[in-house]
Amino acid sequence: METGEGTKSTTIFSSMEEASFHIMEAKVQYGALMSIVSTSLYVLTKSTGSLFASIL
């Protein structure tokens, strides 16, 4: 975190940098979420497929 010793001209730059960092962080979190969702869906379809096979 910042120590608060920046002037007005650098606060705009730091906020822009912070915004881009948050965008990157959101992209990383979204990618992780999608990989978790796809993995769990794959596991669910495999387990339900074997479940249906055992019922039939």
Image: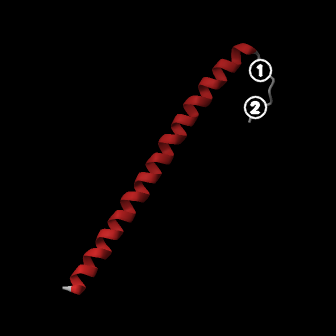
Q: How is the image coloured?
A: secondary structure
Residue 42 vs residue 21: left or right?
left
Q: Quadrant of residue 22?
A: top right
The crowd level at tag 2 (other Cα within 10 Å; few <14, some 14-19, many 20+) is few
> Where's residue 23, x and y in %?
52, 35
Disc 2 + disc 1, Cβ < 8 Å: yes
Q: Say if 22 sits above or below 35 in the image.
A: above
Q: Amino acid at mark 2?
A: Glu
The crowd level at tag 1 (other Cα within 10 Å; few <14, some 14-19, many 20+) is few
* Residue where numbered disc 2 is placed: 2
**Quadrant that contains the N terminus:** top right
> Where's residue 52, x and y in %?
23, 80
Q: Which mark is residue 34?
A: none
Q: Which mark is residue 6?
A: 1
Q: Quadrant of residue 47?
A: bottom left
Residue 52 vs residue 7: left or right?
left
CA separation in Å, label 2 and label 1? 9 Å
> Where's residue 5, x and y in %?
81, 23
Element type at marker 2?
A: loop
Q: Residue at x 29, y 72 (%)?
A: 46
Element type at marker 1?
A: loop
Residue 2 vs residue 21: left or right?
right
